[in-house]
Image (spheres, rainbow, N blue to C red):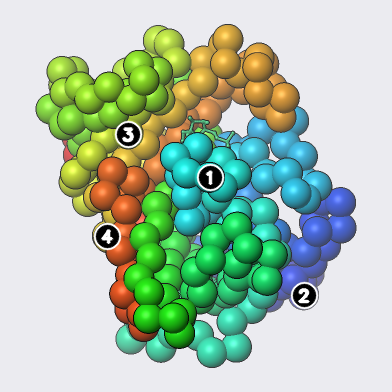
Amino acid sequence: MSTSERKPIEVIKGINGLEKVVLRGISGSSVEVYLYGAHVTSWKNEDGEELLFISSKAVFKPPKPIRGGIPICFPQFSTYGSLEPHGFARNRFWIFDDDPPPLPPDAANKVFIDLILRPTKEDLKIWPHSFEYRLRITLGPTGDLMLTSRIRNTGTDGKPFTFMFAYHNYFSVSDISEVRVEGLETLDYLDNCQNMERYTEQGDSITFESEVDKIYVSTPTKIAIMDHEKKRTFVIRKDGLPDAVVWNPWDKKAKAIADLGDDDYKHMLCVEAAAIEKPILLKPGEEWRGRQELSTVNKEIDS
Ligand code: TA6
């Protein structure tokens, strides 16, 4: 094994010369994060299998966000506000945090990086709230991927602010028509395909045969996504993120998305840990923490 393959953390040039960080776990798993958007674009298991979806037409060229992986949606979700869709955090360059949060007690066998985003003068013109957004990306000893966001109101104007948030996870699936989501049944959701009307999920698990764009509200901490063909289950465990978005554009919408391959919808599913229905309120000096842990189980489980 070459020396570079042994480094747990390596900063290299990625697509179009954009800097990316490669994290290598002790189990042989790996994660890649572009500093542009603090965007996780790859999460591979110990067999080198890619678990996240990246569009075949993804454009790695600012200011266009990267289509796929785990876009960070902050301080706005979708078009629910005056900012660009999903806010600006995903198309800003982040830097390494030189004053990171304290390490967890079991840090020894984990590989992690700490990134930080602060608003520029330009950002403050479009969103007049001072903040520090610290993101810790951790690769655990068994290949689980954890993202912990800490967002603090650093304003000196004594004013609170609110924001929406989502980890916009794009999971790689064998065949969307053979995928099932468990953990959201019987819950209420806002249907973005029906003018955000509120409905109650009737199904005993969620399957896919057409476009789905639903914001489930007040969801459990654990959601399971089963890929029947691969006999693989993705498990999302979340904290501080009460909502969950489920999105697949299906064929017609996929064709209308320039940076998404026409058939890509068959091999992707977005299940996003989010805070949307009730935006997060931060008083001056207050800090919010929102965490998700992604793991896989090599069988289909009941959540
Ligand atoms: O998460 C679902 C969603 O809000 C969809 O409505 C769709 O717009 C998707 O996000 C992709 O958004 P993007 O801005 O990345 O094209």
Quadrant placement of the N terminus: bottom right
Position of 188 with respect to 130 (left or right) is left
Under circle 3, the secondary element is: strand
Q: Residue at x 18, y 18 (%)?
A: 203
Position of 145 with respect to 274 (left or right) is right
Decide if ligand 1 comes within 8 Å of the CB at mark 2.
no
Identity, as a three-letter code, of the amino acid under mark 3: Ile
Position of 266 with respect to 103 (left or right) is right
Marks 4/2: CA–CA distance: 37 Å
Label 4 neighbour load within 10 Å: few <14, some 14-19, many 20+: some
Under circle 2, the secondary element is: helix
| Residue tagged 4 | 239
Quadrant placement of the C terminus: top left
Under circle 1, the secondary element is: loop
Q: Residue at x 66, y 14 (%)?
A: 255
Residue 3: numbered disc = 2
- Residues at marks 4 and 3 touching, judged by CB atoms closer than 8 Å: no
From the viewer's perspective, is the residue at label 2 or at label 3 nearer?
A: 3
| Residue tagged 1 | 82
In this rendering, the answer to whether 281 lies above or below 274 is: below
Which badge, 4 or 3, is on the more N-terminal residue?
Answer: 3
| Residue tagged 3 | 215
Which badge, 2 or 3, is on the more N-terminal residue?
Answer: 2
Is residue 214 shown to the viewer in this render?
yes
Q: Quadrant of residue 141?
A: bottom left
Q: Residue at x 36, y 20 (%)?
A: 195
In the image, 101 versus 154, the foreground residue is: 154
Label 1 neighbour load within 10 Å: few <14, some 14-19, many 20+: few
From the viewer's perspective, is the residue at label 4 or at label 1 nearer?
A: 1
Identity, as a three-letter code, of the amino acid under mark 4: Asp
Which badge, 3 or 1, is on the more N-terminal residue?
Answer: 1
Marks 3/1: CA–CA distance: 20 Å
